[in-house]
């Protein structure tokens, strides 16, 4: 089984910006300090993708998750999401917004939710309050409190 190592990176990391932009994912708010981004590497130390988490009160927002094109089709996206969620810790629920990957996230246990049911702290993020289109599907993964 492939193993990934997640290394924290700054929002200004060139690899992060290029990977997100090339996949059509937002890069407008990467420089804000209230979020954590990660570079995922394989056993050979080769970058395979990026992900991020933003704390939102008692909950979290899963930020753009991207597997680099040359590593797609190997089920690394699901592994990257699982490894990223390990950084969420005690957060009760994890939210995300997607315009194209709802079926992928459903397979990982996320469920579509109405925006009216999303906590105010999550809705106040730049992702949900302005960057992602209103047509984006908002999804939630309920996690047990530890």
Image (cartoon, helix red, strand yellow):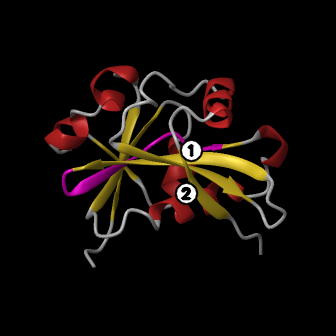
Above or below, 35 relative to 106: above
Instruction: Point out the tag, 2 or 1, that comes first from the N-terminus.
Output: 1
Q: Which residue is mark 1?
A: 65
Above or below, 111 relative to 79: above
Give how far across and how far down residue 108 sits, in percent. 52, 60
Q: Residues within 10 Å of mark 2 (few under 14, many from 20)?
A: some
Which quadrant: the N terminus?
Answer: bottom right
- What are the residue bounds of the magenta stretch? 57-66
Which quadrant: the C terminus?
Answer: bottom left
Give how far across and how far down residue 112 sits, in percent. 36, 46
Tell whether 17 sits left or right of 129. right
- Looking at the image, which residue is at 29% across and 74% down? 144
Q: Residue furthest bottom?
A: 146
Q: Residues within 10 Å of mark 1 (few under 14, many from 20)?
A: many
Give how far across and how far down residue 25 sits, in percent. 56, 28
Tell whether 30 sits left or right of 143. right
Asked if the magenta segment contains residue 116, the reply would be no
- The quadrant in which residue 110 appears is bottom left
Could you tell me which secondary element the residue under label 1 belongs to? loop
Asked whether the viewer can see residue 133, the reply is no
Q: Are marks 2 and 1 in contact (CB under 8 Å)?
A: yes
Could you tell me which secondary element the residue under label 2 belongs to? helix
Q: Which residue is mark 2?
A: 81
Above or below, 33 relative to 83: above
Asked whether the viewer can see residue 16, the reply is yes
- Spatial CA distance of label 2 from label 1 is 7 Å
Give how far across and how far down residue 76 sits, in percent. 70, 57
- Looking at the image, which residue is at 77% across and 62% down? 42
- The quadrant in which residue 142 appears is bottom left
């Amino acid at each position: 089984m492939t193993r990934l190592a997640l290394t924290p990176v700054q929002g200004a990391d060139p690899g992060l910006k290029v990977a997100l932009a090339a996949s059509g994912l937002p890069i407008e708010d990467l420089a804000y300090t209230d979020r954590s981004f990660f570079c995922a590497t394989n056993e050979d130390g080769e970058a395979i993708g990026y992900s991020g988490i933003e704390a939102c009160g008692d909950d979290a927002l899963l930020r753009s998750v991207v597997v680099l094109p040359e590593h797609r089709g190997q089920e690394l996206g699901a592994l990257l999401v699982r490894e990223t969620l390990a950084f969420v810790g005690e957060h009760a629920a994890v939210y995300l917004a997607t315009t194209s990957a709802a079926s992928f996230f459903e397979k990982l246990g996320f469920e579509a939710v109405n925006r009216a049911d999303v906590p105010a702290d999550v809705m106040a993020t730049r992702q949900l309050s302005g960057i992602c289109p209103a047509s984006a599907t908002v999804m939630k993964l309920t996690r047990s409190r530890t």
